[in-house]
């Protein structure tokens, strides 16, 4: 049983960190429209707040900060709750940072804007931020370090290893390479530990037991706190978990991409107590319904991976229009946008699911955050399932080359 003193201490800590968030928001120039962002500034915190940041290694207690937001629930306030990914407690919604650097989902935006969006997400309650060495490459980790450096001890940073950074898109998870690249990621992130370290894709040339054993050593050394896998098969999850407990699995999962419900991955997570982090929870930008009808033609193949993804051809986008229409109709009844419905639906699937929508747009980020206001009842979920049963989803989620690297044993 918790004592009153323990409750008082927790309440006091929440108050301090919530105040820190408000100070961070103000110092970052987010509270007032048009205010310039002080890049690299660390003067947002009071001396007491700075001391808290240095000593509180797992301070994820600011989920009580409330803000009025844009989107379908603009008149409501929200509270960002907490969820557990295995033994890692984070905010119920995370932030995917990949699009904040060029070369993946478009040319990106200027560095100041990216930092402003990331800092705003933190200031409003987000504590899980996702990056990877291959994003950029490298520069995305550096961006995350600059954006979150002043609040490093209040957030969980996830990054990834496993791709060759040589333009071939090949894989390399040899133990000696893992040991080398973790040091490089630590330097770029300007931190002494990585909260969650994912193998980005399963490398069939290296037994997963060797990968898990290497991460186990890094955890013993304190350089890594938690182990994750991205796009593995259920069998690979079980093999890895037997060597080093896996904290989280990251795979594309959304209302339009539900393979993990059928291939045993979600079942393995549930059985083993592993958290699940859906990437692409908004269908890689399709579900909000804001892309042009022929998005693929507008994408630059040099900066946008979706140029070759079947989902974004004009024919396939038109074929998937019934899904957007359904989300629009349902959202109107709930006072929510399509994006908010899609994120709320994912959150309602399992209590150990934490989505990581990403964006370079401040308004879109706040719209995503407001999805926590969308309460889907059992009747709502049944209505969504019935509606989805009448809709056929068209188009693959990635091109053939990338599909060949997922779900491998």
Image (cartoon, grey):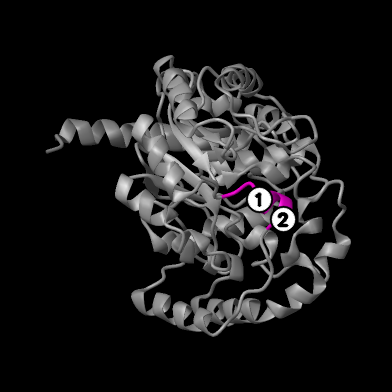
Tag 2 and tag 1, C-beta contact below 8 Å: yes
Res. 336 image quadrant: bottom right
Relative image position of residue 86 (x, y in whole percent): 36, 40
Residue 57 shown left or right of residue 117 in the figure: left
Above/below status of 216 relative to 117: above
The answer to whether residue 269 is seen in the rendering is yes
Viewer-nearest residue: 273 or 186: 273
The residue lying at 44 percent from left, 38 percent from top is: 18
Total tally of numbered discs in the picture: 2
Image quarter hosting the N terminus: top left
Relative image position of residue 61 (x, y in whole percent): 39, 38
Q: CA distance from mark 2 to mark 1?
A: 6 Å
Label 2 sits on a secondary structure element that is: helix
Relative image position of residue 332 (x, y in whole percent): 56, 80
Relative image position of residue 119 (x, y in whole percent): 62, 38
The residue lying at 47 percent from left, 45 percent from top is: 249
Res. 89 image quadrant: top left
Above/below status of 386 relative to 346: below
Magenta span contains residue 286: no
Taking the view exactly as shown, the residue that stands out farthest to the top is 221
Residue picked out by circle 1: 404
The residue lying at 37 percent from left, 30 percent from top is: 243
The answer to whether residue 74 is seen in the rendering is no
Residue picked out by circle 2: 400
Q: Which residues are magenta?
A: 398-406
């Amino acid at each position: 049983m918790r004592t009153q003193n323990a409750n008082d201490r927790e309440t006091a800590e929440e108050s301090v960190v919530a105040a820190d968030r408000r100070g961070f928001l103000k110092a970052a120039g987010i509270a007032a429209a048009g205010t310039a962002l002080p890049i690299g500034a660390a003067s947002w915190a009071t001396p007491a707040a700075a001391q808290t940041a240095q000593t509180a290694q797992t301070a994820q207690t600011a989920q009580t900060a409330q803000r009025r937001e844009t989107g379908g629930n603009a008149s409501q306030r929200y509270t960002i709750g907490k969820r557990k990914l295995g033994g890692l407690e984070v905010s119920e919604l995370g932030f995917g940072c990949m699009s904040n650097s060029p070369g993946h989902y478009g040319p990106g935006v200027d560095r100041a804007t990216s930092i402003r969006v990331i800092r705003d997400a933190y200031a409003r309650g987000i504590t899980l931020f996702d990056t990877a060495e291959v994003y950029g490459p490298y520069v995305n980790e550096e961006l995350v370090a600059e954006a979150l450096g002043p609040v490093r001890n209040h957030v969980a940073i996830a990054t990834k290893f496993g791709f060759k950074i040589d333009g071939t898109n090949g894989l390399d998870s040899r133990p000696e390479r893992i040991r080398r690249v973790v040091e490089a990621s630590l330097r770029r992130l300007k931190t002494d530990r990585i909260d969650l370290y994912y193998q980005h894709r399963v490398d069939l040339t290296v037994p997963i037991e060797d990968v898990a054993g290497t991460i186990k050593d890094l955890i013993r050394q304190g350089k890594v706190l938690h182990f994750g896998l991205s796009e593995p098969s259920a069998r690979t999850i079980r093999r890895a978990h037997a060597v080093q407990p896996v904290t989280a699995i990251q795979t594309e999962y959304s209302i339009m991409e539900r393979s993990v419900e059928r291939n045993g991955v979600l079942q393995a997570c549930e059985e083993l107590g592993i958290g699940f982090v859906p990437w692409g929870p908004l269908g890689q930008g399709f579900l909000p319904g804001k892309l042009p009808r022929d998005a693929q033609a507008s994408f630059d193949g040099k900066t946008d991976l979706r140029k070759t993804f079947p989902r974004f051809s004009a024919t396939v986008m038109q074929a998937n229009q019934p899904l957007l229409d359904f989300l629009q109709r349902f959202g109107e009844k709930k006072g929510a946008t399509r994006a908010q419905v899609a994120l709320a639906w994912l959150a309602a699937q399992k209590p150990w699911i934490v989505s990581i929508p990403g964006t370079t747009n401040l308004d879109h980020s706040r719209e995503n955050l407001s999805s926590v206001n969308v309460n889907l009842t059992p009747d709502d979920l049944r209505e969504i399932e019935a509606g989805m049963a009448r809709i056929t989803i068209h188009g693959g989620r990635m091109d053939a080359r990338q599909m060949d690297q997922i779900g491998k044993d």
